[in-house]
Image (cartoon, rainbow, N blue to C red):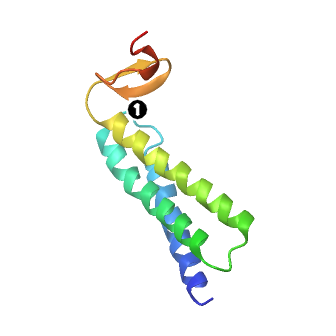
Amino acid sequence: MSELPKLLADWQTAYQEYTSAHDANRYVTAGDPVAAARITPAYRNVARLWRELAAVESTPWWARTAALHAAETFEHQAVVEERAAGGAREVIKGVLRPTGESDRSEVGG
């Protein structure tokens, strides 16, 4: 049980770092590589700590489920930031994809 207080403190620190990065990025242009470099590590760190909190044996099933969902959401946002910051992009059916990546539903049809 002694690991939980440290994990909670680490999560709070990581979330404060995410909040600071998010605030710093508030008025930047979408796809700004500097903004992405600032927030992506924060997203990944919070996601990692959500997973670690979910892995604590004493975590109730419902809290574990919520923590894992939060981790997936933060990890997804990290991927979105990385993609938005790198290279030319195109929008296919409202989904941001790297240029040249085809929509699978259009393949062969």
Does the image show residue 34? yes
Residue farthest top in this picture: 109
Residue farthest front in this picture: 108
Give percent across and percent down for residue 79: 41, 44
Instruction: Give the secondary structure at mark 1.
Output: loop
| Residue at 74% in and 63% down | 62
| Residue at 25% in and 30% down | 87
Query: In the picture, which quadrant includes the C terminus?
Result: top left
For label 1, the residue is: 30
Query: In the picture, which quadrant includes the N terminus?
Result: bottom right
| Residue at 59% in and 59% down | 68
Residue 36 falls in image quadrant:
top left
Q: Nearer the viewer, residue 27 or 59?
A: 59
Give percent across and percent down for residue 31: 36, 33
Give the residue type that dot 1 points to: Ala
Up-down relation of residue 59 to residue 88 (above or below): below
Residue farthest left in this picture: 87
Residue 82 falls in image quadrant:
top left
